[in-house]
Amino acid sequence: MDSKSCNNFVSYVGFEEHEMQPLGSSRRNSSCENGIKLLPGELLIAKAQNVLMFSPVGDSKQGMSGVLSVTNFKLAFVTTDDTNGEDATHQQNHLYGYTDTCLTNVDAIYVIAGDKKRRLLPGNPVPSKVKGIFIICKNMRTWLFSFKFSPLKDGKNLLTALLHHAFPNSHHRLFAYDYKEPYYSSVDKGVQLFRDISDWQNELDRTMRNRGQMKKGWRISSINVQFKLSDSLPQYVIVPASITDSQLNNAAQHFQGSRPPIWSWSNERGAALVRMSELHPTITERTQENTMFENIRKSHPQILAPIVIELNKDISVKSVAAGYSKFVSLCSPENIRQFWLQDNNFYSLLESTRWLKYISYSLEKAVEASEHLNLGTSVILQESDGRDMCCVVSSLVQLLLDPHFRTITGFQSLLQKEWIAAGHPFCDRLGLVVKADTEKSPLFLLYLDCVWQLCQQFPAEFEFTETYLTTVWDAAHVSIFDTFIFNCEKDRARAVIDPNYPLVLRSVWDWREQFNDQDILLFYNPLYNPETSCTTVKPLYAIPCLELWTQCYFRWIPPLEIRNGGRNHIELYTRLIQNDISRLKVNANGSCASPVDKITTYLLQMNIDSFYPFSNRNSDNTTISTPIMNSSMLVTESLLDAQSLLNAPD
């Protein structure tokens, strides 16, 4: 191989300086070191020259040559290959390139020796000569690198650095603490973070608006201010009005995690959705639990007794983790041979993972709870510490019964309320910090998959698309945003005031920190119409009625991509029809200043592939030129001035 061509790097995943100008401030303020684009606070740790990158499940046996680098934020591959440039059919992220991956996204690292591979764990010795590495990411993407033409020590040095920085043993080593970019939040004001008492009051008022006496059944308590009651609950909680803070404090000591029954949501009949942990295993006397049940009964307008649904009988954090481990092997084969071997008995292998069974169980419990609520009976969701399956089922129930949460801002508020504020241990479950006593388990992905199933069964009832859901899962592994890197609000509050490790809170819901307006537009479902939206939805949850979320799980496997096909073509043509309708409305109103005139003509790619906008390759498909606009987004001037919604190279 010509070493001169290997070292003559002229681009970074296609981000030339002139191409970077329209992007977000994070990219504009990045620096460059040895061809690597670095964010403010990002440091180059190690690099290896003349590395070959292969597509693990691709048909090509020829690797792409470049420099592989490890920073304190990402694993980056920089190449001179022109085909590796920026592709308009890809979702473009301001923070990292298409051939980069965040270190917190790395799930497993294997060192390759001949035809065999061996998994390396943090602290394991690194071989003196590294021929290659195989990496599996938490979003199912795989990487295969060969150091055959690299200097002798490059492979070992890079792998040592990667092992050390991809599996930190301290929360302070996450890149969020090093990122120095100034932050000016532009999060939609409709998104409630549920850190202030006003958000809880607004939510209580919203669900109980015009219901008179119902408001008297529940009250906002400040008993957990400064986290005096429970480390994992938010500072403000909504509890039955009939219980005093003193009684609540006494009762909390009997429940795991000091988490007594806490209100989540109410319907128009006054039935409340409540979540709670179980009693401590050492407590056999159930007086305090029965007392709390009685207070919940009193909070109901008709003084009806609640129904208790136990969530940890047929599912657990460990069982979900075990099943998911098998499921990952189906979605991230290391080579094309393994892919075809698995394909021969794919469905039996899928059944053995029990992944679809866990989805079915979650939806079934959500339907069961929603039916009780619709009949006017309050429901209490109960599990060991109330921080895992309670999050899944509680937020699913609210999606089924409350159209507000099927909007993007409502959905993000729902995640804030039922996952972030309620203390789902994201840091532990996502495996962001390596500790012996933590349990890693993809409960959040299980929930997103359940939501995706709802979107497939009710395609016009949700404002967001599957591209949005897939992007949320990807964003959970970007260690810049505080949303998914903490176990509870107490940890987040401490980090903000820590003088030794100051942290700037950045919400992941500020999507313009990561994407351009045309990418954000793809989050919006063109089939959604809030005026005709159903009040409640009831999904089918039997396993034969479920599907595999191919965009999320299989987007990195080229043989599974449908060329010039897939469901996103429905979205594509719906956007075209919407555009025609919007133009007709503008013409009918006789407006001289048509909004369409403000929009640059879009280059709309008609032959997009099934995993768009996460396609694996460049495309030479024919494009047509047509103006596109999203009528639901006309109020946003920056979106009106966007250069393209769906575009492609000539």
Image (cartoon, rainbow, N blue to C red):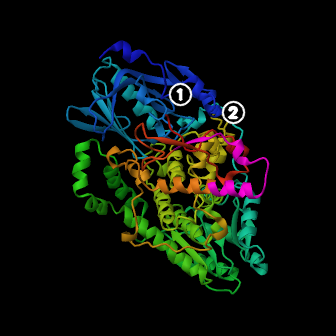
Q: Amino acid at mark 1?
A: Phe
Q: Residue at x 40, y 47 (%)?
A: 555
Q: Which residue is mark 2?
A: 182
Locate residue 110, reporting x and y percent.
31, 37
Can residue 532 be seen in the rendering of this structure?
A: yes
Of tags 2 and 1, which is closer to the observer?
1
Rendering coords of residue 597 (x, y %): 71, 43
Q: Could you say which is closer to the camera, residue 67 or residue 193? A: 67
On the question of residue 227 being in view, the answer is: no
Among numbered discs 2 and 1, the one appearing first in the sequence: 1
Depicted 586 relative to depicted 354: above or below: above
Pick whichever, 28 or 374, lies toward us: 28
Q: How many marks?
A: 2
Q: Give the residue at x 34% y 63%.
A: 354
Does 464 sit left or right of 443 as displayed? right
> Left or right: where does residue 227 sit relative to residue 435?
right
Residue 64 falls in which quadrant of the image?
top left
Compared with 500, 319 (above or below) is below
Label 1 secondary element: loop
Q: Residue shown at 40%/54% (left/top)?
A: 550
- Please name whichever residue, 483 or 89, is drawn nearer the observer in this view of the structure: 89
Q: State the residue position of label 1.
A: 15
- Disc 2 crowd rating (10 Å Cα; few below 14, some 14-19, many 20+) is few
**8 with respect to 639 (left or right):** left
**In the drawing, what numbered circle is on residue 235?**
none
Q: Nearer the viewer, residue 60 or 562?
A: 562
The residue stretch that appears in magenta: 580-604
Mark 1 neighbour class, 10 Å CA radius: few under 14, some 14 to 19, many 20 or more: some
State the CA–CA distance, disc 2 to disc 1. Answer: 22 Å
Vertical position of residue 110 compared to residue 381: above or below: above
Q: Residue at x 44, y 46 (%)?
A: 607
Q: Residue 281, image x and y in percent?
A: 48, 69
